[in-house]
Image: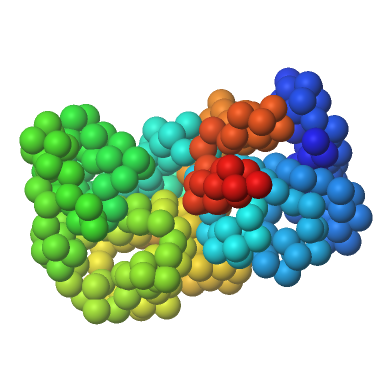
């Protein structure tokens, strides 16, 4: 089976792919240019990497049967279009859960304890006798109330950090109730309005879907405490960024930690980057060497398993597999 990788596979993973497939890959910087992809992936039945897959692009590569996405979120892949074309999409759940939860918590702590602001202060040489006030009074994280919007894998991992490590009271809102976790960790299931009104920290972990687009806008921000901090290490589309900027400017919430943006890469002129009470990172939730390797490895294993006829390990649209199986049985 021919495979095209939109990024150079890490050492060990190229050999693993080659053990079952004929592999070509993009070696340049940044995303594979379209014309290169159309030329070099023309015969590919599978592709691996993190790429923006549109219906139009799928139509131009008619041999494609598998898109092995390196990442758990697949919002940059038109999954309904892939499903309609019988293309399996796989993602990389689980392997990045704790790493991404660590980053969400790092943002929470950095904003609460003004870490990056204090770092800028000291680097600017402003910590001098009689100089500007260097007390940097922040907010306690321990024993605070943590509101988790989306108690899936990553949301749960953030909640556990809060409940077990920082003795926080955890509220959560989701479309699915997790009574098992409520009993185990004492979480309280509430509606979104209650969560926004009662939390000291609100951390967003919903997937990006039409139904979650701008789920935090002006009205929701207005329901938060003026002392509250918003953390978004989920997806940029969850938050109406203009409304967030306005709420921060007007002091309607106390701060924000943001790893994901409505536009990525974010515009350097984004007003969030000029605010002292904002900690911003460039979508690095899963960015540790070990986790990025584990994600690429899982994506590669999806391809290898598919090439060996065993079916992918973590399909995102398993209905394609069911359909293919039925077709095989009928023929
Ligand atoms: C994911 O896996 O979805 C992370 O956000 C990295 O893209």
- Where on the picture, by quarter, is residue 86? bottom right
55 on left or right of 44: left
14 on left or right of 206: right
Q: Is residue 272 above or below residue 74?
A: below
- Front residue of 174 and 86: 86
Tally of numbered tags:
0
Task: Name the spot of residue 248 as percent of width and height, x first.
Answer: 33, 70
Task: Name the spot of residue 331 as percent of width and height, x first.
Answer: 65, 47
315 on left or right of 173: right
Q: Residue at x 27, y 47 (%)?
A: 151
271 on left or right of 115: right
Visible residue check, residue 209: yes
Q: Locate the N terminus and report the quarter of the image it occupies.
A: top right
Q: Residue at x 36, y 42 (%)?
A: 154
Visible residue check, residue 49: no
Q: Is residue 248 above or below residue 40?
A: below
Q: Which residue in the rendered view is the most extreme toward the right?
A: 39
- Front residue of 147 and 212: 212
Task: Name the spot of residue 128 as percent of width and height, x first.
Answer: 41, 44
Q: Residue at x 11, y 57 (%)?
A: 190
Task: Name the spot of residue 308 as percent of width and height, x first.
Answer: 69, 27
Q: Which residue in the rendered view is the most extreme toward the front?
A: 331
């Amino acid at each position: 089976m021919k495979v095209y990788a939109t990024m150079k596979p890490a050492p060990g993973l190229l050999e693993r792919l080659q053990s079952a497939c004929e592999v070509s890959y993009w070696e340049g910087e940044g995303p594979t240019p379209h014309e290169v992809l159309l030329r070099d992936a023309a015969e590919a039945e599978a592709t691996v990497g993190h790429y923006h897959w549109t219906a139009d692009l799928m139509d131009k590569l008619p041999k494609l049967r598998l898109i092995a996405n390196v990442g758990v979120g697949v919002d940059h892949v038109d999954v309904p279009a892939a499903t309609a074309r019988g293309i399996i999409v796989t993602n990389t759940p689980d392997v990045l859960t704790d790493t991404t939860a660590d980053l969400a918590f790092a943002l929470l702590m950095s904003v609460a304890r003004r870490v990056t602001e204090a770092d800028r202060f000291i680097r600017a040489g402003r910590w001098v006798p009689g100089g500007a006030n260097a007390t940097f009074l922040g907010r306690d994280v321990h024993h605070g109330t943590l509101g988790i919007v989306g108690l899936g894998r990553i949301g749960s991992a953030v909640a556990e950090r809060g409940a077990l490590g920082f003795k926080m009271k955890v509220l959560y809102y989701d479309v699915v109730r997790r009574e098992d976790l409520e009993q185990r960790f004492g979480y309280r299931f509430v509606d979104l309005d209650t969560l926004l009104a009662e939390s000291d920290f609100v951390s967003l972990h919903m997937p990006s879907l039409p139904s979650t687009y701008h789920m935090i806008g002006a009205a929701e921000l207005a329901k938060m405490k003026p002392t509250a901090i918003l953390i978004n290490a989920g997806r940029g589309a969850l938050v109406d960024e203009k409304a967030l900027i306005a709420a921060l400017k007007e002091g309607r919430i106390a701060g924000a930690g943001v790893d994901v943006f409505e536009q990525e890469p974010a515009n350097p002129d984004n007003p969030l980057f000029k605010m002292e009470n904002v900690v911003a990172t460039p979508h690095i939730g899963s960015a540790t060497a070990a986790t990025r390797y584990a994600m690429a490895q899982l994506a590669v294993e999806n391809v290898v398993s598919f090439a060996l006829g065993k079916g992918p390990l973590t399909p995102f649209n398993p209905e394609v597999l069911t359909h293919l199986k039925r077709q095989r049985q009928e023929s």
